[in-house]
Image (spheres, rainbow, N blue to C red):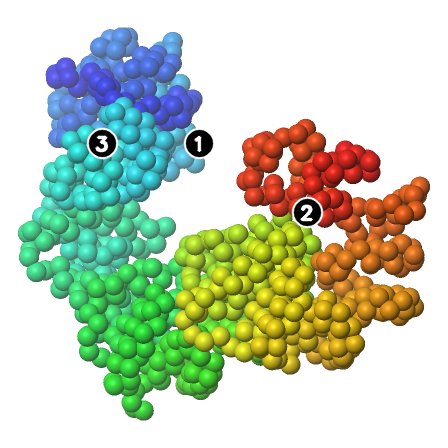
Amino acid sequence: MLTVRFAVPAVPKLLVSRPELLKRLTAGMGGPLTLVSGPAGAGKTVLAAHWAAKGLAPRPPVWLTVEPGDAPGAFWAYVLEALHRGGVVLPAEVGRPTRAEGVSQSLLVRLAEGLSGQPAPVVLVLDRFDAARAPAITDGLDFVIRNAAEGLRTVLTSRTDALLPLHRYRAADEITEIRQADLQFSRADAETLLGKHRLEISPEGIRLLVDRTEGWAAGVRLCALAMQRSTDPEEFLRQFAADRTTIADYLLNEVLDAQPPATQDLLLRACVTDRIHPDLADALTGRDDAAQTLAGLAHSNTFLEQVDATAWYRLHPLFAEVLRAHLRQRCPGLEPRLHGRAARWLARAGQLTEAVTQAAAAGDWEFAAGQLIDNVAIGRLFTGLETDQLGGAFADMPAETKGAAPALVGAARRLTDQDLPGCQAGLRRADLYLTDASGPQARLCRAFLGVLAGRLAGDLAATERAAADADDLLERIPPRLLAGHPEIRALILAALGSVELGAGRLDRAESALTAAVEASGGQGTEASLCDALGSLALVELLGGRLRQATEHARASLAVAERSALPPERRARVGHLVLAGVSVEHDDLPAARSHLDLATLAAGPRPEPVAVVEAAVIGARLAAAEGDGEGALAAVHALGPAAFPSRLSAWALDELAVAEASAYLARADAAAALVVLDAVPSDRPEHALARARALLAAGRGDDAVESLAGLSDEAGVPRSVRAQACLLRAQIAASDGASEETRRRLGQALALARPEELRRMFAESGPWVGRILRQDPQLARLHSWLPSLAPRRAGSAAGERPAVVEALSERETEVLRKAAQLLSTEEIAAELYVSANTVKTHLKSIYRKLSATRRSEAVHRAQDLGIL
């Protein structure tokens, strides 16, 4: 007898305690069997030894380490000796095995009977039970466990599922299982272990370590030891290569070398793919035994697992990395040939992304690119969950690679980087290979890229030509191909709608973008759906339809969040639109928050129309906050560098209108007129802006002429008509025409009410409040506008108007802090916001309370009972 086999292994000095797993082991004592199963180095023995050392079992466990080659008689002799050394008293008639080859059934009957009579359950830990491969051993153990009743609790640690009938134990709820997923180290576990090694690693470094090792306990420990010897542990993690560490020795010696030669050959060949199918493995080995071999490897936890109960398998990434390095050393030049063979098998199996990746790894660029073109899958370079993987596959493709397919894919790669000259050069190379005899797939991909390139260039004519070609070619593509790639049509429509929007053709943009949204219902169209919804929201905002704009903007942001689009592929337009809506609703803090998110968030380079509208909304917000200089600066900040192409006449007029409004905020009507006259336009918004400037310059008659037709002309946005009516009411009020003033003001309110256009009334001046105080019925009719709420009873005639608008909850908090004489910075610290946010709230408070400074606002709020 080897005494060491009865000893509980020593617990490592640098131990990571796993309290939840220890609790599960203890809870397992309520049933007859507990199985701890996982690959080599998963921490099975350490867990069981720690549990035993902490005294968490009902009585001190009896420990036996099982060794390979134990015959049934020898195994049971060791079990009986372990029980004896553990203080378990059995009846003398139980006896001992008389031969190594086996034991009699009567001995097992006597043993089970002797255990069932124990005053307290015996806890037997069989470590490394996978070494017991004789069916007679597992059959005998199953018999003893079942017949010992409450007298025996068995804990097995094993690299494989024991040959015990586990399904019966599961069906009877008589087994506790702790498996590989449970044994994996979490980030907290890894951080604890690194701390015990006196390594201070950043959260990102810990995340990288756990991701690379997939929580494999031995891998984390071996990395920690290597990092201790490194001068820069963080850099070690960034450049970590499994094949150059002790992990490689561990996996080669403990796992690969333990396999038969034929199994080693299969693993070395199959490691070139991320996933392994038995038929693919047979294609790589030239044999037909992969199905049985892979199933056996997965069953024995040989760092290979079945993927979601499918026919596919997956190697642990570290093991695959070590195998690939070993393959290169053992069989130089074989790896590229295996990649090529795998690419063709995967292509026949319809596994497009993996086929492309394998062909690229083989350096077969024509086949790799041809898969994207022939399957009309080039849109997957722009949208879908496989975008990064496909793009990365072609990262090393030489620009001079011959053929139409490589040229088209190269152009698409440049387009994803927003490299317009590089894309155009690639398209010119593709045109050298494409002819009328080329298949419709290749020509469709060319037209598709032409649409996207036209969008990036802001070239409406080129985009429309390419879109027309694409529409024609879409009819010639087999329906089965198009059904699998809805992103092609969705991206074409989204690009066309965006370019129409940039040109100010809002009706056509709305039509194309609506169609893009409808076409983006399939898997892989998340980016195009987010993009189209954002652009559609901007169309609605520009048309004055704020409710629909809000709905589309929020839907765009929800799609990005729900589909987990990375920041670099999230359009910023959704927040930009919400900022614009918030300005018109006179919710300035919300507008500032959304505008910051729109302009500061990471994402693709914004298109000219988004840049223009960001400046317009920023200027309008600054003016609303009382910052005329800031409003002007927001428009003037745009320079030629902001636009890779010339702006459309519509965009130039948008900027001119915003600049004129900024000048009006500074009471400089002359400058506003100069700006507007420099950009002649027949847009209703231009005529409205000019009327405002003329009225501010004291030229009321000219303002009326400029407003002609705006209040009732078909096709004029509701918001413009509402503002035109409000200006006419203001002109009538200045002329003393009270009936005309009330009529026009009523029209403006009626037009503004559906979209709750509050800002136009807030910036019109105090005359609106004066008129409405004389007409309580009209004020009550439009109580949706807080500034028009009827005055409180008892207000003295001639005093300042009541609150222009109710203070928000946060504004009231800011005002209370101000009343306590706290500084801006102190208020920010108390409320956990920035000082700029506090300033924004204060400006809004001053406006709503008709105050000009902090003390005045506090006194006014106290008079009104707000404080």
Earlier in the chain: of badge 1 and badge 3, it is 1
The kind of residue on which mark 2 rests is Ser
Q: What numbered label is drawn on residue 224?
A: 3
Q: Position of residue 228 (x, y in %)?
A: 19, 30
Front position in the image: 121 or 265: 265
The mark closer to the camera, 1 or 3, is: 3
Q: Going by the picture, which residue comes out furthest to the bottom? A: 436
Mark 3 → mark 2, Cα distance in angstroms? 55 Å
The answer to whether residue 16 of the structure is visible from this angle is: yes
The kind of residue on which mark 3 rests is Ala
Element assignment for label 2: helix
Q: Are marks 1 and 3 in contact (CB under 8 Å)?
A: no
Earlier in the chain: of badge 1 and badge 2, it is 1
Element assignment for label 3: helix
The quarter of the image holding the N terminus is top left
Q: Position of residue 135 (x, y in %)?
A: 22, 34
Local crowd size for mark 2, using a 10 Å CA cut-off: few (<14), some (14–19), many (≥20): many
Q: Position of residue 766 (x, y in %)?
A: 80, 55
The residue that mark 2 highlights is 844
Mark 1 → mark 3, Cα distance in angstroms? 39 Å
Q: What numbered label is drawn on residue 173?
A: 1
The kind of residue on which mark 1 rests is Asp
Local crowd size for mark 3, using a 10 Å CA cut-off: few (<14), some (14–19), many (≥20): many
Identified at 66% across, 29% down, the residue is: 821
Mark 1 → mark 2, Cα distance in angstroms? 65 Å
Local crowd size for mark 1, using a 10 Å CA cut-off: few (<14), some (14–19), many (≥20): few
Q: Position of residue 220 (x, y in %)?
A: 25, 34
